[in-house]
Amino acid sequence: MTQTADLLNEALATFDVLFAEARAAGEPDPTAMSVATASLDGRPSVRTVLLKAHDARGFVFYTHLDGRKGRELQANPHAALLFHWPRVRHGVQVRIEGAVEIVSDAEADAYFASRPRGSQLGAWASKQSETLEGRDAFEQRLAEAERSFPGDVPRPPRWTGLRVRADKVEFWYGADFRLHERWLYESDLAGAYSKRMLYP
């Protein structure tokens, strides 16, 4: 088992190389990632979201804190992410696990300001994960948001970014006969990273 302060940077650099290959390979959306959460009683839930930023601090996506994943991640702030890029090499998966934190207001404001106006209004109109009586009700809320914000659209106070601080990063490289190659980068409680190979 190898251990060095540079291993996190190595893992992030590997992710960047594979991410670039996914773009070049024509993956439909390389930023698409599955996010798994769990309630306090251990019931799992998974959905696909889009990666909006990543660096040594972690991997960021945006959501409404009052939706199901937002509620679960506030109650149990741990998540697992999965990228699957079948067009890269013989198929690549990247698995990431870690604690979750809310991004700063400044970071969330900057990203929200970069979104298309329709997406901004949709963030106000949607009561994410709540029961919707019918599409007309949502269209009405969207029209109300349009009237409320004729100019710049501010960020809803409960709409923000969540950052997964990676303490495990696994690269899974597909191979014939299910003889895959797997590398795991993992931090201990002190934040020191190790790297090891896993059986397929």
Image (cartoon, rainbow, N blue to C red):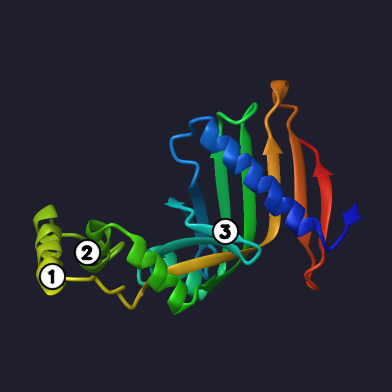
Q: Is residue 24 left or right of 109 when viewed as pictured?
A: right
Q: Earlier in the sequence, mark 2 or mark 3?
A: 3
Q: Amino acid at mark 1?
A: Pro
Q: Amino acid at mark 3?
A: His
Residue 158 in percent (x, y) is at 35, 75
Which residue does the image show at 73% across and 31% down from the upper left? Answer: 180
Q: Is residue 16 left or right of 52 when viewed as pictured?
A: right
Which residue does the image show at 55% across and 28% down from the upper left? Answer: 87
* Residue pointed to by mark 3: 54
State the residue lying farthest toward the top: 177
* Residue pointed to by mark 1: 150
100 or 150: nearer the viewer:
150
From this view, report whether residue 92 is shown above or below residue 128.
above
* Residue pointed to by mark 2: 121
Query: In the drawing, what numbered circle is on residue 89?
Result: none
Does residue 71 show up?
no
From this view, report whether residue 135 is shown above or below residue 19.
below
Q: Quadrant of residue 183?
A: top right
> Which mark is in front, 3 or 1?
1
Residue 103 in percent (x, y) is at 50, 73
* Discs 2, 3 touching: Cβ within 8 Å: no
Q: Earlier in the sequence, mark 2 or mark 1?
A: 2
Tag 1, which secondary structure? loop
| Count of marks overlaid on the render | 3
Q: Amino acid at mark 2?
A: Leu
Q: Is residue 55 left or right of 31 when viewed as pictured?
A: right
64 or 13: nearer the viewer:
13
